Image (cartoon, coloured by chain):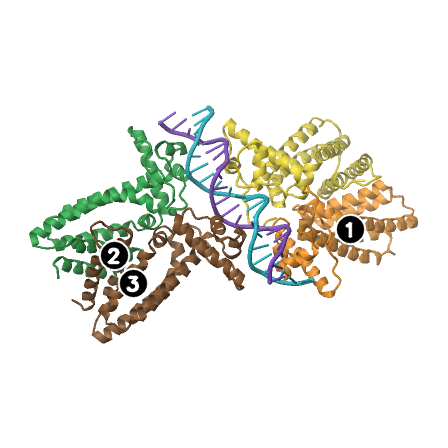
Chain colours: A orange, B yellow, C brown, D green, E cyan, F purple
Amino acid sequence: MTTDKIDLEMKKVPRQARSKATVEAIIQSCKLLLLEQGYNPLTTNDIARVAGVSIGSVYEYFPGKEAVVTAMVRELIESYFKKLKSEITSKHNNNYETAMRHWIGLLFKLVQENKRLLQVLLFEVPYSLRIVPVDSIKAELFTLVMQGAARSQNQYKLNVTPEVLYLISTTTAGTLTGLVFAPSPHIESEKVLNELSNKIVAWMRQE
Amino acid sequence: MTTDKIDLEMKKVPRQARSKATVEAIIQSCKLLLLEQGYNPLTTNDIARVAGVSIGSVYEYFPGKEAVVTAMVRELIESYFKKLKSEITSKHNNNYETAMRHWIGLLFKLVQENKRLLQVLLFEVPYSLRIVPVDSIKAELFTLVMQGAARSQNQYKLNVTPEVLYLISTTTAGTLTGLVFAPSPHIESEKVLNELSNKIVAWMRQE
Amino acid sequence: MTTDKIDLEMKKVPRQARSKATVEAIIQSCKLLLLEQGYNPLTTNDIARVAGVSIGSVYEYFPGKEAVVTAMVRELIESYFKKLKSEITSKHNNNYETAMRHWIGLLFKLVQENKRLLQVLLFEVPYSLRIVPVDSIKAELFTLVMQGAARSQNQYKLNVTPEVLYLISTTTAGTLTGLVFAPSPHIESEKVLNELSNKIVAWMRQE
Amino acid sequence: MTTDKIDLEMKKVPRQARSKATVEAIIQSCKLLLLEQGYNPLTTNDIARVAGVSIGSVYEYFPGKEAVVTAMVRELIESYFKKLKSEITSKHNNNYETAMRHWIGLLFKLVQENKRLLQVLLFEVPYSLRIVPVDSIKAELFTLVMQGAARSQNQYKLNVTPEVLYLISTTTAGTLTGLVFAPSPHIESEKVLNELSNKIVAWMRQE
DNA sequence: TATGAATGAGTATTCATTCAT
DNA sequence: TATGAATGAATACTCATTCAT
C-alpha cells in the first residue's frame, strides 16, 4: 500500500490482433511469474522476457508493473465469475438447499484449484491493486446471488434478512480460506463443508 | 513469497539495557512504518532512520528487514495474546454463552482497533514471515480455547465435535475479517455479530 | 582467494557496435584503474564512472567486478601473446642461440614496459581470477615454444629433456621477475640477462 | 596498493605478559584467517573474534588491519629466517656443493610446507604491506649467504661474480615458485631440483 | 510500433573505526 | 586497560523507466 497514487489503467487499448496478442502475452507472463515467485520478486523486465516481448512493449501498453497486475487480476476475476455464473445458472431449477450445497462446493473447488495463485493475490499483492477489479465484479456477483435468493424466497417462503445473508457470505469465505490456506490435520474438508452447508440451510429456514 | 530461504532469526539477543533499547526502537520503527506505508516500501534504511539508530545497528541484530518484521510480528502477537488471555480468563465464571459472546466481542474490538496494522500483516506481508510467530502462538491459543470449551462441556453437557469447533473458528474469522476489512453499507456490525453469536451458541447446544 | 565461487563469465556477449564499445570502455577503464590504484580499491562504481557509462551498464554485461577483471586479463594476455608470436615467428630462421637470446630480450622488454600493470596482476589480483585466462593461453604459448624447440633440436641435434625445458622457463621467469619487480642496486639487467642466456644456451647444448 | 599512505607500525609495544599474549593472539588469528580465506575477506572484526579479544583491543595496539598483517608478515619472516639460519649454519663445514644442495632443499621444503600461506602473502597481500618487513630481513639474509659464499670462495678458489650470485637467487626463486604454485604434470620436483643444483654448482665452478 | 541498450536513483549490506562505560 | 555497542561512509547490485534507432 504505497502512499502515492499509482496509475493502474492501461495506456492504450490494443485494437489489432497483434497488439492484443502482445498484451495477452504480458498478462499471462505476469500470472505465471506470480505463481512461481509471488509478488515481491516480480519485475517488469522478467514480465517482458517471459512474455517474449521487449520491455519497451510492456511500457507501450502499461504505465508500470502495478497496472499489469491489476489487469491480470481483472481478467482472472472475470474468468472466475463467468465460470461460476455458467455453472450456477445451469442449476437454477434445483431447490435452494441443493443450490446452496452446490454453490459452496463450486467455490471450494475453485479456491482449491487456484490455491497458489489466490494465495499470492489475497495475501501478498498490495491491497490497492485488488480493490479496483474486485469492486467492479462484486456488484455483479451480489446481484447474481440476490437473484437466486429472491427466487428461492418466493418459492419456498424463506425470509433471509440482509444480516443473515451477509453472515452466509462471510462464514463461507472464512471457512474456505481456512480449509485451503491453513488446513488443520485431523480436520476433513468434506465434513466441515457438509456441516457448514447444514448450518447455512438451517439459517435460511430460520431455524 | 521469495523462493530462496531467508534468515528470519536475530543475529544476537540484546543483553544490556542499551542494546535492548536499540532493538526495541528498531521493532517499533518497523511497526510504525508498516502502519504508514505498508510492507512493500519498507526499507532497512528507513527503519534505522525512524528508530533513531544507525543502519549498522539494524544489521548488528537482524540479518535483514524480513527478520525485523518477523520479530515485530512475534512481539505483536504475544501482546495480543496476553491481552486476550487476561480479559478472557477474568470472566471464566460466566457460562459458555456469555463467554462466547464476550470472546467474539473482544476479538472484534481487537481487530477493529488494529485495523490498519492487521491489514498490512494479513494481506501484504509475505506468508513466510508470518508462519513462524503465528504457529508458535496458535498452539497456546488453541489450548486456551479448548480449556474453556472443556469446562463448558462438562458443566453444560455440551458435545462440540472437532468439526463444529473448527467451523466456529473459521466462521468467526471470516465474519470479523469481512466486517472490518470489507465493510458493506447498510450492514451493521453489531447486528451481524449478534446474529453470529446466536448461531454459534446454538451449534454448541447442538441444535 | 574468496572461498565461495564467484561467477567470472560475462552475462551477455555484446553484438551491436554500440554495446561492443560499451564493453570495451568498461574493460579499458578497469585496466586504467588497476594501473593507478591496484586491485583492492577497485570498485564497480569507479569502473563505470571512468568508462563513462552508467553502473547499470556494467551489470548488464558482467556479474561483478571479478568478471570485469577476468575479461580484462583475458584480453591483455591475448594481446601480449599476439605481439610475442608475431615478433618471434618473424625470426624463425635464426639459429636457436640467437632465437633464445631474442626471446629472453622480448620477454624482458614486455615485462619492463608493463611493469606496474603486471605487478598488480601477478601480485594482487586473487589467484582465481587469473587462472582461467592464463590457462587458456598457456597451452598455446607452450605449443609455440615447443615448435621452436623441435625445429632447433632437429637442426642442431639438440636433446633438451623436459626437466631442462621446465628449468629454462622457471629460471627465466624468476630472473625477469627479480630484475623488474625487485631490482638490486649495482646489478645491471643487461649483464644478468646476458649471463642467463649464456647459461641457457649451454644447457641446450647439454654442457 | 592503495594510493594514500597507511600507517603500518604498531601503536604501542606490549610490555606486560597479558598484553603480549593479546598481541600474539591477534597476530595468530590474522595468520589463521589469511590461511583460511585469503587476504581480501580479512576483517578486523573477524581478527578480534578469532583471537578471542575485543575489537577495541585490536585498535589499542594496531592502527588498522594493514598493520596487523605487516606485523604478522614480519614475525613469520623472522621465524623462517631463524629456522633457515640454524639449519644452514649447523652445516657450514660442508663443502659448497653439499651446502648449496642442502640450501635449495631446505628452501623447497619451507615453501612446500607453507604453500597456502605463502600463496596468500606473495600473490594477494598488497605489495606495500610486504616491502617493509621483507626489506628488513633481506639484508640479513644476504649477509648470511655472502658469508657462506665468501668462505667457499676462499676455500675452493671459486670466483662467483655478483651477477652469477644474483642469477643463482632469482633462478632458484623462480624454480621453487613454479614447482610449488604452478606444478606441471609429468614434471617431478626432485628431478628438476637436482638438475637446478647441478647447474648452479657448475656456475659456481665457473664452467 | 517495436526494440533493447542504457540509465541512475534507490536499496541492501559491510566493515573499519570510535568512544562511552 | 578492556569492552563491545554504535556509527556511517562506502560499496555492490537491482530494476523501473526512458529513448535513440
Question: How many circles with numbers are drawn on the protein?
Answer: 3
Q: Is residue C96 left or right of residue A24?
A: left
Q: Are marks 3 and 1 on the same chain?
A: no
Under circle 1, the secondary element is helix
Viewer-closest of D138 and C192: C192
Under circle 2, the secondary element is helix
Query: Contact (CB < 8 A) between labels 3 and 2?
Result: no
Q: How far across and how far down the image is residue C50, in percent?
A: 47, 51
Residue under the point 67% across and 28% down? B86
How far, Cα to Cα, is label 3 from label 2? 14 Å
Chain ID, mark 3 = C
Relative to D33, residue A87 above or below:
below
Chain ID, mark 1 = A
Q: How far across and how far down the image is residue C59, in percent?
A: 52, 54
- Sort mark 2 into few (<14), some (14-19) or many (20+) by Cα contacts within 10 Å: many
Relative to C83, residue D65 above or below:
above
Viewer-closest of A181 and B187: B187
Q: How far across and how far down the image is residue D92, in percent?
A: 12, 48
How far, Cα to Cα, is label 1 from label 2? 87 Å
Q: Which residue was labeled with disc 2?
A: C175
Q: Which residue was labeled with disc 3?
A: C106
Q: Which residue was labeled with disc 1?
A: A104
Under circle 3, the secondary element is helix
Q: Are marks 3 and 2 on the same chain?
A: yes
Q: Mark 3 against mark 2, which lies toward the viewer? A: 3
Query: Amino acid under label 1?
Result: Ile
Query: Which quadrant of the structure image shows residue B9?
Result: top right
Q: How far across and how far down the image is residue C88, in percent?
A: 31, 68
Query: Which quadrant of the structure image shows residue D54?
Result: top left
Query: Amino acid under label 2?
Result: Thr
